[in-house]
Image (cartoon, helix red, strand yellow):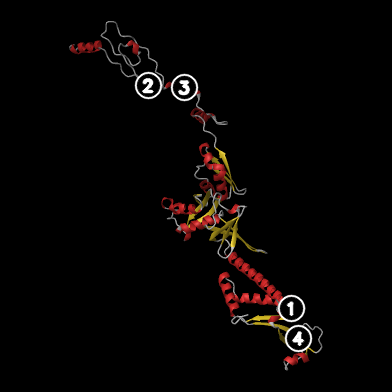
Amino acid sequence: MNEEFITALSQLELERGLDKRELLTSFEEALHQAYIRNIAHNREVEVEVHIDPESGALDVLEIKRIVESVENPDREVTLAEAREIDPNAEVGGEMEFPVDFQQYSRIAVQTAKQVFLQKTREKERQKVYDEYRDRLGDVITALVQRVDNKGNVFVDLGRGEAIMPAREQIPGERYTVGTRLKVFISKVELTPRGPSILVSRGAPELLAYLMRQEIPEIADGTVEIKAIAREAGQRSKVAVASRNSNVDPIGACIGHRGNRIQAVTGELQRERVDIIQWDSNSKEFVRNALSPARVGAIELDTKGGKATVTVNSDQLSLAIGKGGQNVRLAARLTGFKIDLVEAQPAQSLDQALAAASATPKGATARSAPSDSAQAKFDSLFKAPEAPASTAPAEGEPGGEATPGQAAENVPGAAASAEPDGEKAPADRDQSDSEAEEEQSDRPPA
């Protein structure tokens, strides 16, 4: 061993992020196993291997216990043999016997190399697992490496490789080798073949992360994301609430002319994102979640987790959505099983009035008008009968029509009904006027 070996370990430490001392320990263990297998041939010997971390000097020592009578020559040595090397040796002590590295055969060196590489890979895998286990639930930028024939996408995370299966991808999104994209770390496991890292582009957490990046009110906590329901690549619903009464949560998320939400959807292949006002009242929350449809009465069964919503026929298809998507996302967002019930069609005006005026079963007689009251009411709209009177004498200049006289008995009369039921005075003809003038010319009696 020499300084070049130490330099190689230092370079390996920089490239793979491994500790040089751990690498030295791994190499010492590899030499120890190679000695036991190829030199001692699996004898019960005790060997220690030391490598100086500065100079790279290698020491391989075989350890034996000093005894008076040897029973196991692989681990014991007599006092006389020990004092030939160290005059101060005593029974019960240990004696170190240096092993010449030249004793290592080519096979032993190759074995040590394989063991060292295996241990290095194990430490590297453990390092990657420990790092990404702590980053579980984070969103990072990955580089697309390859796509297999099953549709699985393999991405480079920088220190490890992750897999994105087809179910975690955005439908319709194309993944080209060398493309950088944001992924959500959804699962990290340590398997015999190394760490298994699962990433996703369809997780709701990715949408929440992008909204925090693009919307300052969400980043500083003024606006809070309460719930997310997502069908990747198609449509999502996000329920938001504001902790500041002066801040509109929906307007803050949409931004001026929709610039904020467009920046989010641009990363998600123009996925449609509906911003919903969260409400502590479950009925209002269900109503908001079904938007843009306008719904009617809502009945909640909190124990059964069911909501029955009445919807007019013109809003039913909008409430259901394409392929049931709108009501399905609303159910995920609110946590209720939503049943849409179509409202009954409105009756005609005549039917509605008839139903409203009909006497309900069990109503009292007072509620229906009596025959005498109905007769009095009808008499208000009938002309009063003319009272008996004597016709004016023949040859008289003509008299005025009495109030009860029929209109056809007075030449040139035009009567009209008044609200009080009396007739208006008839216009007097010219003979009546001449009679009045003639009477006015007579001298007073």
Question: Which numbered mark, 3 or 4, is in the foreground of this view?
Answer: 4
The amino acid type of the residue labelled 2 equals: Gly
Report whether 437 appears left or right of 411.
Answer: left
Q: Is residue 408 above or below residue 123?
A: above
Q: CA distance from mark 4 to mark 2?
A: 142 Å
Q: CA distance from mark 1 to mark 2?
A: 138 Å
Report whether 175 appears left or right of 256.
Answer: right
Residue lying farthest top? 394
- Secondary-structure class at tag 3: helix
The amino acid type of the residue labelled 1 equals: Ile
Residue 113 percent coordinates (x, y)? 66, 73
Mark 1 or mark 4, earlier in chain: 1
Q: Are marks 1 and 2 in contact (CB under 8 Å)?
A: no
Pick the front one: 339 or 149? 149
Question: Which numbered mark, 1 or 2, is in the foreground of this view?
Answer: 1
Q: Are marks 2 and 3 in contact (CB under 8 Å)?
A: no
Identify the residue under disc 3: 375
Mark 4 or mark 2, earlier in chain: 4
Report whether 254 appears left or right of 413.
Answer: right
Residue 41 percent coordinates (x, y)? 76, 76
Mark 1 or mark 3, earlier in chain: 1
Circle on res. 65: 4
Q: CA distance from mark 3 to mark 4?
A: 135 Å
Identify the residue under disc 2: 421
Identify the residue under disc 1: 39
Q: Are marks 4 and 2 in contact (CB under 8 Å)?
A: no
Question: Which numbered mark, 1 or 4, is in the foreground of this view?
Answer: 1
Pick the front one: 311 or 141? 141
Q: CA distance from mark 2 to mark 3?
A: 15 Å
- Secondary-structure class at tag 4: strand
Please tell me in which quadrant of the rendered image residue 408 appears. Answer: top left
Pick the front one: 264 or 438? 264
